[in-house]
Structures are given as C-alpha cells and as structure tokens.
Amino acid sequence: MDGLSLETVAGWGRHPVCRAAVARPERLRLPRAGRVLPRGLGRSYGDAAVPASAQSLVLETVRADRILAFEPSTGALTCEAGLSLAEILRVFVPRGWFTPVSPGTKFVTVGGCVASDVHGKNHHRDGSFGGFVGRLVIETADGRLVECGPDRERELFLATVGGMGLTGLITEATIRLKPIETPWMFVETEPAAGLTEMLDRLRHAGKDWPYTVGWIDCLATGSGLGRGIVIRGRHASRGEAPGVPPRENTPRAVPFDGPAWLLSPALMRAFNTAYYRIQCRRTGGRLVSHDAFFYPLDSLRDWNRLYGRHGFLQYQCVVPRAAGAPVLSELLDRLSRAGAASFLAVIKDFGPESDAYLSFPLEGTTLALDLPYRGPATEDLVHLLNATVIRAGGRIYLAKDAATRREDFERMVPRLPEWRRVRDRWDPEHRFGSALSARLLGDES
Amino acid sequence: MKAVMVGATRGMGRALARLLAGRGDALALLGRDPNELLTSSRDLVARGASGPVPTGHLDLAEPAGFEAALDAADRALGSFDALIVTGGDFAPQETLERDTARLARLLEVNFTGTVVLCQQTAERLARRGGGTICAFSSVAGDRARRGNYLYGASKAGLSAYLDGLGLAYADRGVRVVSVRPGFVKTAMTVGLPVPPFAGEPESVARVVLRALDRGKPVVYAPPIWRWVMLVIRLLPRAVMRRARF
C-alpha cells in the first residue's frame, strides 16, 4: 500500500464531511484489516463516498486507470475501475466509440458508474450502466479476487451493480462501448407550457430519440407549474456533421464559494425565467459537441462551489408511470412552497427497471432538484418529499442522497432484504461501509 | 520514437508513456514487477502505441543485468533510439537517517544504477549514430536542504552526470534531457505536505514531451520551478541555515 494522507472527504454537494485517511494507489489492493470505503472521483452528491468515521480508510481508485483490452469487433472495453468516462471518451471517441450510458458529468470512474448503476438521457431506450457490464473483478472482504457478471456469480453481480461500493472493491470491469459515426450530436429543443405538456412531449420524443431530457422552471406556479424545455438528441450521422471534431473548450474554474445572495429566491426566479425564455427561442435542430450536450456543467469546474460553503443536497426521485402528473405536481408544489429554490430541475422518462437489487431507475418519471443546504429545514423538506414518493411507490437515488431516513429508505426498496443477504454473505463483518450505509442500513460507524 | 522506458508503470513515467503511445510511438517497458509491466503494456497498446509493447526485467539496483535488458529491448523494438528513465527511489529523510541499508539502496538506484544504465545506453546509441537519453533527476539536487539532503545528494550527483553526458556525447549525436521535477502529486509523494506550485503527473509529462522533441538539455517541470530554484540557489548559506531551510 502506498502512503496515506489525512484529508477532509466530502461528496460533490459538500455536505456532510469527514476527516479520514485516504490512499490513492496505482494498484488497487485491500488492506488486510479494517474498514474500507472505495471512492472514485467523488461526484456522488451526498454521503455515499464519505466515510462514516475517521476509523475508515478511503481507498481512492483514480490512479488505477489502465485500459486492459479493447475489442474493436464488439466494442468490449476492459479496464481498471478507476478509469474515468472522460478518459474513455478522449481515447475512444476519435475511433468511433462512445460510452453506452453517461450521467451528467464525465468526471466519474467506471467503478463508480457500476456502484451507482448510473443512468443517462437514454434510459428510456437503453437502461442503466449495469446493463452494459459483462464482467467485474471484485476484491471481496476476505481478500479474494472474484469474477462476476450476468452469467457467473450472478447474485454478487446484482448486489454490486447499484450496490454503492458496499459489497467489495471493484478492481476491473468489462463494459460494452457503442459505435458512433461522428463526435457530433444532433439536438432539438421545444418548450412545454406546463407539466402535462412536458410529460407528453417527453413521452413522445422518447419514441424516436435515443436521448431525451426535460428542464423545468421549478419556480413557476399555477398554470405554469412544470413549464420548461424538452431537449432531445442523437449522435449525428456522417452525412450531416462537419468532417472535423468539435473544438474542445477548456473548463473554467469557479474561483470562490458563492455568496449567499446568489441563492436568494428573487435571483433564482430571474435565472429560471431567463433560461426558459432563452431556450424557448432556440427551437429547431442544431449540431453541438457531445460535451455540450451531455456535460454542460463540466465546462464550469468546481461548479458545486456556487452553492456556498454550506453546500447543497441534490434530491432525485423516480415515481412509477401510473402515479404520473399528480404526484409530480405535488412534489414541485412542495418545493416552491418551501421556498427552497433550485437552479435546475431535471425531469426524464425512465424505461424498465433492471435486476440489480438496489438499482435506482424504475419505469416512470424521474425528477432531480438542487437544494441549497440550510440545515434541518432542508432535511425536513427531503422527508416531506420522500413521504410523497413513498406513497406513489417510488424511490430515491442513493448517489445523490444525504438526508433520507432509514425507515423511509426501507419502505422504498422492496428488494433490500435480498441485497442484505448477498452483502452479508460476501462481507459478513461489513468491512465496506460509508456514511450512507451507517445512515440507511444501520451499519456501525 | 522507439523508446525504452524504465519506471513507466507509475506516476510521471506512466503519464509520459501514455502521451508517447497516444501519438503512435513504439515503446518497450523495463522494470521489476512483471505483472505491473504487463498491465501497463496492455494499457499502452490500447492507447495507440505502435505495435505490441514488449516488457523485460530491469532492476536499477542490479547493473549486472543492464546489457542483457538493453539487448532484449533492441531485439524487440529493432534498435531503439531513446531511453527514458523515470524510475527512482524515494524515502523521507528521517527514514534514510535511521536506516543506512535503505539509504545505500536509494543511492544505488538513483545514482549508481541510473548512471551505469545511461552510460551503457549512450555508448550503444553513439555507435549507431545517435539518439536521446532522458532521465528524471529532481529539483532536490539543485541545492542541499536540511530536510531532504540525502535524497537530494543522489539527485545532485545524477544532475551533474547528465550535464556532463550531454556535453561529452553531443558530437556523437546523443542528446541528453535532464528533467528536474518539482513537487509532483504522485503515489511517491502521498502523505508529504503539499508545497505551493505542486504539479500533476499529466502536466509534467506534457512539459517533458516538448523538451524531448526539442532535445532541451535541462527542463524544470512544472516550469515555474526553474525560477523557484533560481531563487533558492542564490540564497546565502547563512540565510538557509537561519530560515531552517
């Protein structure tokens, strides 16, 4: 094991934080004893990659980022778990390959994508990341290297995909990249005047388009509730795209923590309204880079600092299709009544859920909100939103959560007992743990 | 470029190897851990290195094995034209003060071994008309400081050697690039307090690649260290001592 450094560890939302020893080796190996928390690039918002106490070693995987094989006939890529999507795209987009599923940032590792079973704008068509994983190598709590996949050690595989790093250390993965003709995206946007129209348009766009997403002005109320923009896209074909790749832009850094007035309701309202108006005018098709389409926020490095030093919570839930518009409008209504302004609310259609026990997506609609962290009031709001989600038969996304209560979580996840059984088999002493597992699963810290 | 690399499985060497592979250079990796060499070889092939990336055994503490390793690399690559040594030993000053066996090994690896390897390679390259030798020294060799003079001494010796080698072999077509990294955030430096101007392996690698292509004899990376070290070299000894530098 390489050296350790004592660091303050937090999720992307910068709340909560914990001071702990961090190892960042070039070769992943578990220490022989003690509690461990594997962590990738730290882009999960909440406490999934924050240790429960200083007793835990944080094992950052980012230096274990070697590509081990690529099979051009199938797109099968085998790599160490710390390889980032950004690096995959840098190496493979020029060769005509793209990551099969991508979250809203490319600064995530393959191991992290598996552990959170991330989804992207194409979930309605392609499902989540775990569906493209053919094989994982996991170092389990007892130090064994175990290969698992859809066809071998299936239970361990299904518990690890979406398992938040709590079943073992993912060291290697084989994933299937998908072929693209050009590095360009063909994109169309259209406005939706209210929630019903938004849901209709998303549904409709999803029939023909591989990538769809809606953006909601979450401060609009009354008849405008749920108004926003539907964005749909696909990889551009050779015929319609320029022969040259899009220009890479260098990310700009946020130099300081955002001041409090940045989060004032008035300014948020102005921002949301302005964004809506601008986007309404930008209808019709256009070509953009995949960076601009998939990762608009990556162009602002450290954008999480905009929320000030108290950080923020991100809340993402999914509700089944049957629950539909009434539940979503209830959620938006609660949000605006709490005065917890959000720069951004993202809405999206999900396709069928996967077999992975703790996987987040569920056939229906998902809503994601940024909530500036204001202490107990913000946590109360989360509990309130959760109550609505539970009633609708929905659930929340663990990669973003930092406030859900254990009893609420247990009511959201019917397959939790199965997952616990598999986890206990492979890690009976719960060597792998996080602040999230202490909060939601009752692990000792 | 057909480069033989020592230390390319980790840190700055890994980053530099990836840049070379990305532009289609041919590479061979020498080192101690066969599994690590093989894993890095696969990585570099996937990133576009020209041809397979052969690996072979070389321990900088065992000069007796160098000729055989260089022969093997020559056979595998078909006469290589560059040697890049990023490998080296490091330990905190307190450890080296306490443990003289550890100290002896560090001196052996960073100075004796590296010098012998570069010397043998320089002869080899000169015989066939020239090439490039690039070795990683350190800013720690520019001026002795109380906090790391043992490691610094090994690198001071290496820097002096590389300077001389460049002068001596210039006429025979051998270009020597001496790299002096400042503090770089690699696995080697984990746990050490991070000073201002600390660099990342990737940015250091880009600076070194440019120097390699131009045959620049001495390169500081990140470049700001050139000026930092200029100031530190000019400090009077009395100031060094009083500031407990």
Image: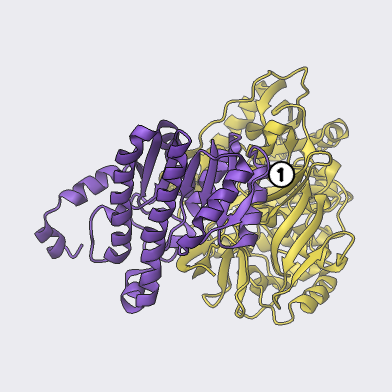
Q: Position of residue A445 (x, y in %)?
A: 60, 79
The subunit letter for the residue under badge 1 reads A
Tell me the quarter of the image containing the N terminus of chain A: bottom right
Instruction: State whether residue B36 is above or below residue A72.
Output: below
In terms of image quadrants, where is residue B189?
bottom left
**Identity of the residue drawn at 61% across and 41% down:** B77
Instruction: State whether residue A257 is above or below residue B153.
Output: above
Task: Return the residue at label 1.
Answer: A102
Between B143 and A431, the residue placed more toward the observer is: B143
Between B148 and B213, the residue placed more toward the observer is: B213
Q: Position of residue B6 (x, y in %)?
A: 51, 52
Hue of chain A?
Answer: yellow
The reply to whether residue A388 is in sight is yes
Hue of chain B?
Answer: purple
Is label 1 in a helix, a strand or a loop?
loop
Residue kind at label 1, given as amino acid type = Ser
